[in-house]
Image: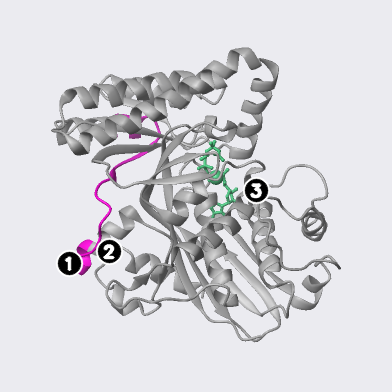
Amino acid sequence: MQVRDVLVSAPGKAILHGEHAVVHGKVALAVSLNLRSYLCLKATTGGNLCVNLPNIDTFLSWDLSELKHVIPPVSGRRDELKLLDPDLVRRLREFVGVTNGNLNTSQMATLSFLYLYLSVFGSGELPSLTVSVWSELPTGAGLGSSAAYSVCLAAALLCASGAISSPLNDWDHTARWCQEELELINSWAFQGEMIIHGNPSGVDNAVGTWGGMLRFLAGKIIPLSRVPLLRILLTNTKVPRSTKVLVSRVKDKINKFPSIMAPVLDSVDAISCTCEKVLSEMTSEPITGEHYNALEELFDINQHHLNVMGVGHPALDTLCRVTLAKGLHSKLTGAGGGGCGITLLRPETSSAVVQATVQDLKDCGFDCWETSIGGPARTRGRTRERAVQMLRIKGTVSMVQIDINQWKGSDSSHLISRLMVFC
Ligand SMILES: Nc1ncnc2c1ncn2[C@@H]1O[C@H](COP(=O)(O)OP(=O)(O)OP(=O)(O)O)[C@@H](O)[C@H]1O
Ligand SMILES: C[C@@](O)(CCO)CC(=O)[O-]
Ligand SMILES: [Mg+2]
């Protein structure tokens, strides 16, 4: 089978409000980050499937003749993408040698890769490929690394199989797919997330696919086009955690104390809706200190709720305390239990205060960096450099032209060069 070489990229995300509650049908607000994952897929002739995942030290190769036996006898192309094919999952778990018990980092990534590969190509001839994924995102830290990985896999495999087009745009050296193709990528990425998370809401893969800021409610995705550009600090406490474990911990708590937890989830829902309203006001009227006061208070209230849900961590408490000492407000982002937190910076926050806060957080052993989220949706009518920069911020899943020279001088050139080592 003839497949095309593909290089794709998808962004990570930060959740402003609604993590965990969104799994239980409440509103979440999430936004893409200018940190991305990159995937290079190359057709080969060796009759095998190779995967290189340098972020998690995983380098594997299988004979296609062995892999063919994993495909269930009645497997065909599935249009219902809301559930996993249990037979294929069971066979793959046997194939990777984990029939029961939890999968480790490498096994989860491998299983979701093989699941998507066999689902996309399983009804025809299996192509010989090398797939390499490299990410700027910390793995398993709350910034949507699993979703960016799944979105890249879905986009590249669908594109290589011819199920979606491979549009390329000379103007900014990236290309995006049409709405229908993005929906297909998103639903396949959701399958990858199901293998990694167990019970994902779908918010992370939606941001990885569409980028920008989204309101997500029970699978319904509403892009928020009118949002202000916000300065934030992202802090990685470096405490390892697993989204799957944390999501199931919250579920257990809800089952144990339904009447106590239901109002907490309702309150988080109201926080997301209130935040959305404040953000919208900030684009339609002059921004005042009151807007920032409200955003800060919403961070504080939500952080308390997340502690009540049992997904806090002493390192996250430290983050909140250290930033508050400088007058800044923080909350965890993503699944919590460690991982990353987000700190809101006000327009008047001086660079001296930012630098001192970053230093204090680094002194706690954390990684910390300033970035921005939100901002206007348009990327047209800008210089190429500005467009590339905006794309990294707004960041839909996109196809990237493989000619590295064209990226010289852009932020991404060194990343793509590193990725090419594996291609
Ligand atoms: N660059 C990568 N290469 C291979 N696998 C990855 C990569 N990034 C993430 N993964 C897979 O995703 C898993 C981490 O997913 P998890 O959902 O726990 O964290 P996250 O997505 O970073 O955080 P959150 O879901 O809170 O946003 C890893 O154990 C690994 O299996
Ligand atoms: C914790 C969670 O709400 C967000 C993880 O980034 C899980 C999910 O929505 O799938
Ligand atoms: Mg995840």
Could you say which disc has been placed on residue 388 in the image? 2
Res 396 seen here: yes
Task: First in sequence, mark 2 or 1: give its number.
Answer: 1
Q: Residue at x 53, y 69 (%)?
A: 156
Query: Which quadrant of the picture is home to ligand 3?
Result: top right
Taking 314 as reference, is 380 above or below it? below
Q: In this figure, which colouring scheme has been used for the structure?
A: one colour
Q: Amino acid at mark 1?
A: Thr
Q: Residue at x 54, y 26 (%)?
A: 311
Task: First in sequence, mark 3 or 1: give its number.
Answer: 3
Taking 320 as reference, is 423 above or below it? below
The answer to whether marks 3 and 1 mark residues whose Cβ atoms lie closer than 8 Å is no
Taking 163 as reference, is 296 above or below it? above
Q: Residue furthest top?
A: 260
Q: Amino acid at mark 2?
A: Val
Position of residue 316 in the picture relative to residue 1 (left or right):
left
Q: Secondary structure at mark 2?
A: helix
Q: What's the magenta region? A: 358-386
Residue 404 covered by magenta stretch: no
**Where residue 231 appears, x then y in whole percent?**
25, 39
Which residue in the structure is indicated by mark 1? Answer: 383
Q: Secondary structure at mark 1?
A: loop
Q: Residue at x 65, y 21 (%)?
A: 253
Q: Nearer the viewer, residue 171 or 410?
A: 171
The answer to whether marks 2 and 1 mark residues whose Cβ atoms lie closer than 8 Å is no
Disc 2 and disc 3: Cα gap in Å? Answer: 31 Å
